[in-house]
Image (cartoon, coloured by chain):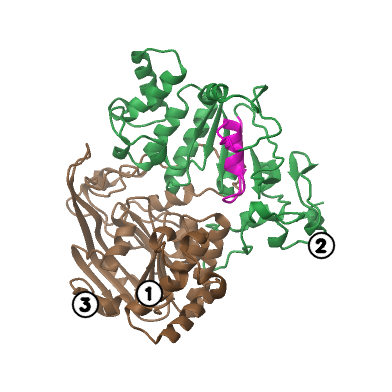
Chain colours: A green, B brown
Amino acid sequence: MHAVQSVSFAVEPGQTLAIIGESGSGKTVSAYAVMGLLPHSAQVSGSIRFKGVQLVGRSEKELQEHRGRNAAMIFQDPERSLNPTMRIGTQITEAVRCHLPVDRKEAHERAVELLRMVRLPAPERRFYEYPHQLSGGMRQRVVIAIALACQPALLIADEATTALDVTTQAQIMDLLLDLQQELGTALLMISHDLALAASYAEEVVVMYAGRIVERAAAADLFGNVRMPYTRALLDAIPRADLEPHVLLPVIGGRPPDLSTLPPGCSFAPRCPDAQQDCRQDTPPLEQHELRHWWACWHPCGKETAS
Amino acid sequence: MTPVTEVGSPAAPGDTLLEVRHLVQEFVLRDYGGVKGGVLQAVADVSFDMRAGETLGIVGETGSGKSTLARSVIQAPPPKQGAVIFQGKDLVGLSHRAMKPVRRDLQMVFQDPFTSLDPKWTVSRIVAEPLVAYAAGSRAERRERVNSLLDLVGLDPAGYGKRRPRQLSGGQAQRVAIARALVLEPKLILCDEPVSSLDVVVQAQVLNLFERLRSELGLSYLFIAHDLAMVKQVSDRVAVMYLGKLCEVGPVRDIYRQPLHPYTLALLESIPSPDPPGGKREPGHVISGEPPSPLNPPSGCRFRTRCPRAAERCAAEAPELRALGADGHLVACHFPLSGGSPAPAQPHVEPAAVKR
């Protein structure tokens, strides 16, 4: 089964790339590949270069060195990424000492400094608290502090704000962007929320059934959507500027089973614009405009926009 | 009586379906693992009305008491104080036996369909259970009713009736939960974040389903969500809740066009927009901080610790819900937005404290 097929993207230092897609579209698998976190049964071909260094085919030990030192990941559920039986301070100190050659005291200072950096109120006191004493937003701040423990060059946020309230989500995203500006970290943001990506990322990659179907600068994409799937994702978002009791324009069906992908474009069975050729040949991802790639035989908005 | 008695959407048809009066729900917590116990007032003196066929959206952050409010309405558990008058009958204090016929008209849909569906039962059995519990119809009639409901929520009874919850996707499982809630033809459905755990496209599909069922069956929803944009899609009126109290209630259009409470504005500004004006958004437009502990709420207005407009008066005096602006638009704020005049000062407040 191909969980992910011919996926290519790049993130620059200090930039934010968002990978968007539904459950099962392959966005998390792509991120795991970058982290070297895929299980042994996974066969990765192609290349993943981190600061020019090839990651594909490295041993587990080398990958472990890569994780933490170079790249760190924040997961959706802070409850599950934190150890409920350990004080949060201990958990951060552990992460610091895993990767940096510092003694206990320095690690403690660094941990408090990290808690301050993620704007956890009263960091000296919070240091000795347990995860259950914190709110969901604060826990996610602790997870971010752990991820930042060894100054990674790349931070992967896998649905990092999905479980949070809108207000907390906005706070955490603002924090991530501030930290990014401060530290020059590259941010790879994985989300199912196109609106969130539009608000916070420079470049957006939309995935469907394991392939990239559209890739564009966030500022250009939203007025200029080409791939009908991106259009469908965008239309499905409830918006505060729509009238109440209006049905959302929504596509039917579900993403296909990756083990029995239909021939041609994977989105064709759900696509409102699908034609005969879509069901026979898979459209390649090609650059059609400046900073805008799409994989579609019959892109939308083409006749009006060009 | 507070001015809340007049809450009502003039445009909504039908009689009053649900009246909630001065509802208070409290939980006693013990000290545990470094978290200090005490009496947690999850819902503090909340009153609102709903008319038949109307949908009221309730919005608030985690811990605002919106789920507790819904649970208090169905008496699970019954509230500590106040009245819940459903179809002219006060439910508070009713015996379990007396509640049973009422629950027929009052159903609930939860956030996580997988934990609210029995994993070992087939879809048909899950949807049929309320009919069995109320001994409604013969076996053949029940089967027919289940099939027609599965059809109604967009699941083919032949293909899905025999499946078990683990063989369903999240969206399909939520459709089953909706079918189960509908099978007894209830008047009011309490929806507690019913689409929050779903993917965007599936979320839109289920929202549309709610909307279609509402217009076809004349249902009323009490629709709870933390996302103001989503609530707008389905609601006639919206109530914004913060730390156990309502801060703003009003017709959907007014709330979004002209929010009066600073908290409502903060919630609106937190919604990420797919095409933000001026491209990528700049940090710093969101309210800071987190809701204070409900064990020890701030004096006066509960939002004042995070409010950019807070003045001395806000700490001294809790604002009451009062009518302001268009019909049925209520706000509990001393210094409402959109040029609303400050609330008439109480005698004991010094004028200097009111000025800002």
In this rendering, which labeled residue sits more in front, label 1 or label 2?
1
Answer with left or right where residue B61 lies relative to residue B68. Answer: right
| Mark earlier in primary sequence (1, 3) | 3
Q: Kindly identify the amino acid type of the residue bearing the numbered disc 1.
A: Glu
- Residue A104 on image: x %, y %: 34, 15
Does the magenta portion include A26?
yes
Q: Kindly identify the amino acid type of the residue bearing the numbered disc 2.
A: Gln
- Residue B225 on image: x %, y %: 42, 58
Q: Kindly identify the amino acid type of the residue bearing the numbered disc 3.
A: Arg
Answer with left or right where residue A216 lies relative to residue B174. Answer: right
- Does dot 3 land on a helix, a strand or a loop? helix
Residue plotted at (23% across, 63% down): B77
Q: Which mark is residue A276?
A: 2
Residue plotted at (61% across, 59% down): A254
Q: Is residue B330 above or below residue A175?
A: below
Answer with left or right where residue B317 lies relative to residue A75. Answer: left
Provide the chain ID for the residue under circle 2: A
Binning the other alpha carbons within 10 Å of mark 3 as few (below 14), some (14 to 19) or many (20 upward) gives: few
Binning the other alpha carbons within 10 Å of mark 2 as few (below 14), some (14 to 19) or many (20 upward) gives: few
Residue under circle 1?
Answer: B129
The picture quadrant where one finds residue A199 is top right
CA distance for labels 1 and 3: 18 Å
Q: Nearer the viewer, residue A235 or A285?
A: A285
Residue under circle 3?
Answer: B97
Q: Which residues are magenta?
A: A15-41
- Does dot 1 land on a helix, a strand or a loop? helix
Provide the chain ID for the residue under circle 1: B
Kindly indicate whether the residues beneath marks 1 and 2 are on one polypeptide chain: no
In this rendering, which labeled residue sits more in front, label 1 or label 3?
1
